Amino acid sequence: MTASARIDWWKRLLLVLAMVALALLVGEVLLRVRTHVHNRHMFARALSKPLQPMKGGDATLGEIIRLSPDDRIIYELKPGLVDVRYEGQLVSTNSLGIRSPEPSPKHSTLDTRPVVTVVGLGDGGMFGQGVADGQTYLDGLRQRLAMHTPGVRWDVWNTAVPGYNTAMEVATYETKGLALQPDLVVLGMHSDDYDPPEFVHDGDDALDPERSFVFELFRSLPPRKDLDTPGLVRRSTWARENVSARGSASSAPRRYHHAYGPAALRGALERLHGLTVRDGVRCIALAMLDDHEVPAMMDTARAVGLETLHAQPHIEQHVAKQFGRPFSWMDYGTSALVVHPAGEHPSVAQHALVAKLLFEHLRDTGWIEESARKARVR
């Protein structure tokens, strides 16, 4: 082969390679555009007519939540649930998707009492997984407040959702809680507040720089399974699929990496502190248990200026009294304070204990009387 022929051959090869590269690039762009369009349609479908569990019927967590229009919150409780059986107990939500009674105007002709409002932010512990409507510690707080000062209407809103982390809870406060005009915010702190959300968007991230949609197309990845609710997939399902698909483990898509972990928790607490100080609202970070990372989380809460309240000493006393020996986590797991040892969700007894603790703290620090006085002169 002559030198001229070799040059022509290399030119043709380079041209073919360039055309292949261009085709792959165009294909990658087209697949990402298609993914973006598909996500929009799926998002609209998921929000349009979410399937509603039947009254009295059993439901999973995925069946009582829906996709949230706020990307920071990701998912929320479906509004208008009526006596749906979740974790063996009846659960209802109001028109706001909150596990509390239907809100009524603060200035009502039917109830002219002054109003004091409490907003709870939390996950499954505050929500009350495994306990029925009216048995959570926020319900218990409302009942105690009403008995202590009946001349005031005590509105207590439980915005907690199982699987939320602190970043999602503070975003919920910004989108829902502020509109309720609270006088007090109770933030539930739990050991999984560093974790990614329990559910993530089902749609693929069209802007993910670490993926090749063309490569995945040729690999013929299996379709996603285990979808509990339209538009959402469990975090564990996502991670399992992505380990098999791309050979590397990840607990959540890249789009959520800013929304969990110690830095995200601190940032969310700083935002919450800033909002409550701005509005003159008292804010208490409450931990039912001081297990795993909770002490470090509570230290962060105090560092940013939040008031903190620990139920752990009272829980230890209760367990020690039940078993007649010093507290141990093994005894706690089989005590009357948990629904069942496997999940260790707080029982009705633990919710009642925390309600009493929170009420007494508010009473002894003078907040109840001060809030009632302010409400009367508004």
Image (cartoon, helix red, strand yellow):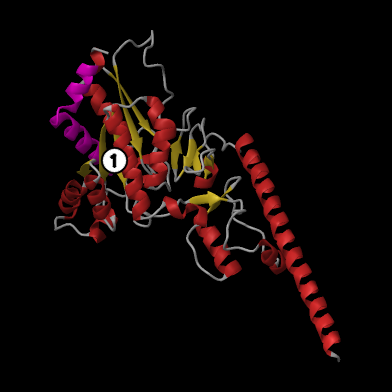
Quarter of the image for the C terminus: give it: top left
Residue underneath mark 1: 351
* Image position, residue 322 (x, y; %): 19, 51
Is 366 situated above or below 15?
above
Quadrant where the N terminus is found in the figure: bottom right
Q: Quadrant of residue 51?
A: top right
Measured from the top left, where is residue 260 in percent x and y?
Answer: 40, 53
Residue drawn at (43%, 52%) of the image: 258
Residue 350: % across, % down? 27, 44
Q: Residue furthest front?
A: 4
Name the element at disc 1: helix
Amino acid type indicated by mark 1: His
Most common secondary structure along the magenta stretch: helix
Q: Residue at image x 51%, y 39%? A: 70
Does the magenta-highlighted stretch encompass residue 371? Answer: yes
Residue range highlighted in magenta: 349-374
Return the residue found at the far bottom: 1
* Vertical position of residue 265 compared to residue 278: above or below: below
Magenta stretch: residue 130 in it?
no
- Where residue 271 appears, as percent x and y from the top left, is 34, 40
Around disc 1, counting alpha carbons within 10 Å, would you say few (fewer than 14), some (14 to 19), or many (20 or more)? many
**Which of the 4 image quadrants contains residue 41?**
top right
Query: Looking at the image, which is closer to me, 112 or 250?
Result: 250
Residue at 57% of width from left, 36% of height from top? Answer: 54
